[in-house]
Image (spheres, grey):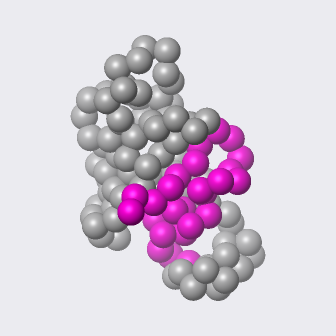
Amino acid sequence: MKSANVYRNGELVGVLTRHDRHSYEFEYDGQWFNNPEKPPVSLTMPKTKKIYKADHLFPFFFNLLSEGVNRKLQSRQLKIDEENHFDLLVATAQTDTIGAITVKPNK
């Protein structure tokens, strides 16, 4: 199992967890969830107390990954399998992403 914190403009939104390559979860942080002024991480994942579960990386997070040649280069340089979307996300979405969302590994 691996997990990563998801931030929006530096504020903790929730935790993304990969149990294995076919089991993912996302859960909102309690403080983020309880603040009505804070938006959902995406329109496809409205704020709710339930834990989102999927057998693949959620599309919102998958779309933070590079595509094509850039993904191949990142995979090679980082020595991460190109199909290991979770590890690529955590390695590449820590600081410089398009938009307000960053993803940082839990130690």
Q: Is residue 5 above or below residue 2?
A: above
> From this viewpoint, which residue is outermost toward the front?
107
Residue 42 versus residue 78: which sits nearer the camera? Answer: 78
Question: Closer to the camera, 27 or 67?
Answer: 27
Task: Residue 11 in the image: state x and y as whole percent.
Answer: 52, 35
Observer able to see residue 29: yes
In the picture, measured across the screen, residue 104 lies left or right of residue 32, that is right
Residue beneath the point at 70% across and 53% down: 96
Looking at the image, which is closer to me, 6 or 55?
A: 6
Q: In the rendered view, tell whether residue 27 sits above or below residue 66.
A: above
Location of residue 45 in the rendering, given as x and y in whole percent from the top left corner: 42, 35
At 39% from the left and 63% from the top, the residue drawn is: 107
Q: Which residues are magenta?
A: 82-107
User: 43 or 105, which is in the foreground?
Assistant: 105
Residue 56 visible in the displayed image: no
Query: In which quadrant of the rendered view does residue 50 lie?
Result: top left
Q: Position of residue 2 (x, y in %)?
A: 34, 65
> Does the stretch in magenta take in 90?
yes
| Residue situated furthest top in the rendering | 36
Relative side of 15 to 91, left or right: left
Residue at image position (45%, 36%) is 13
Q: Please name the residue shown 36% across and 36% down the image.
A: 28
Location of residue 55 (image quadrant): bottom left
Rendering quarter of residue 21: bottom left
Q: Residue furthest right?
A: 69
Point out the image quarter for the N terminus: bottom left
Residue 85 drawn at (x, y percent): 50, 67
Say whether residue 32 is magenta.
no
Q: How many marks?
A: 0
Q: Is residue 40 above or below residue 80?
A: above
